[in-house]
Image: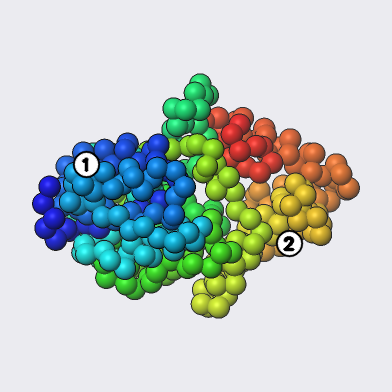
Amino acid sequence: MSAARPLVSVVTPCWNAARYLPATYASLRRQTHDAWEWIVADDASTDASLSVLERLAARDARVRVLPQAHAGLPATMRNRALEVARGDVIAFLDADDLWHPQKLERQLACLKRHRDAGLTWSFVQEFWSPEWKRATAPPTFWARRDAPDPFVMLLTRGNIFCTSSLLLRRDAFEAIGPFDEDPDLRIGEDHDFLLRAARRVSFVRTPGVLVRYRLHPGNVTRSHTTARMDAALRQRLEKRGDLHGRARRLYLSTWHLKRAERAMTGDEPGNDPRVELLRAWACNPLDATRWVGAGLALAFPGPLLPRVYQALKRTQARAQGRAASPHRLTGHLD
């Protein structure tokens, strides 16, 4: 393959992904747009990842391997790869995910049509990694919904954009800046990146399901935020002056709701879930679900509240069926 200057730089952080890398590369090699380079920063993997990558690079000059000292942070690996990226457009592909063959072609065409947009994304389909041999439908980690106001949705719904679905212009990336390498954001660096992106560039969705997101033991726990990550995100939002007016009220409502749910599961034993549910309602009284939470907080004292709340969340998950997202009170994989 030619090593000519690529249009698209595809960035991948890698740690112990040897069993998945051949399929990930195959999905990249099948792209109908082939002017790309694949830059894989390996985080000192202890399996055969580096050997697999070196074999791929020996066959395909578009594959560039960057062995790194172990950092344990996807943000660090992405930043090291971005520092040497040569493309005018940047895409992200996690080491265990797969792309639709027309992913790059369609997204480049989308950016060409929407010249004012700096970033495009697509819907995602989850699938069980074959080694799990699961017969049940996979949980929905990436809801298929449009985002008319990406910033507010990122504040209130969490990270709704799969990193492997993103493609952005280089000038957009330069406006956003690199990924934050703070260890407190180890599982939220992409969320912080997108919050900054939503304040600086326009988003547009490329139609279609263009990414397959692999579910396996190593990534399932990443779907659940932690108190430390939430605190780090809020600190950055406050410091940047991004929380004000309606956006602040909506964000704080979600903040208090998550604190209430963590208190119910014992993750934040010092918090009173009844108080947090009432604060969530006070910040956003126009949301009917906040009224439900406030009503439960007033009606069920003590240990009854978590039981009733969990029962309602499970009822909601059953009603949503395959569209239900994983939730800390209903289980990761139900």
- Residue at 33% over, 54% down: 40
Q: Nearer the viewer, residue 73 or 58?
A: 58
Which kind of residue does numbered mark 1 sit on?
Answer: Arg
Q: Quadrant of residue 318?
A: top right
Sequence-first tag of 2 and 1:
1
- Residue at 85% over, 41% down: 304
Q: x, y percentage for residue 158?
A: 53, 54
- Residue at the disc numbered 1: 29
Tell me how many marks there are: 2
Q: x, y percentage for residue 134?
A: 51, 24
Q: Residues within 10 Å of mark 1 (few under 14, many from 20)?
A: some
- Disc 2 to disc 1, how far (Cα)? 51 Å
Q: x, y percentage for residue 217?
A: 54, 38
- Residue at the disc numbered 2: 279
Point out the image quarter for the C terminus: top right
Q: Nearer the viewer, residue 70 or 21?
A: 70
- Residue at 74% over, 52% down: 267
- Residue at 44% over, 43% down: 47
Residue 169 is tagged as none
Above or below: residue 131 compared with residue 42: above
Above or below: residue 14 compared with residue 191: above
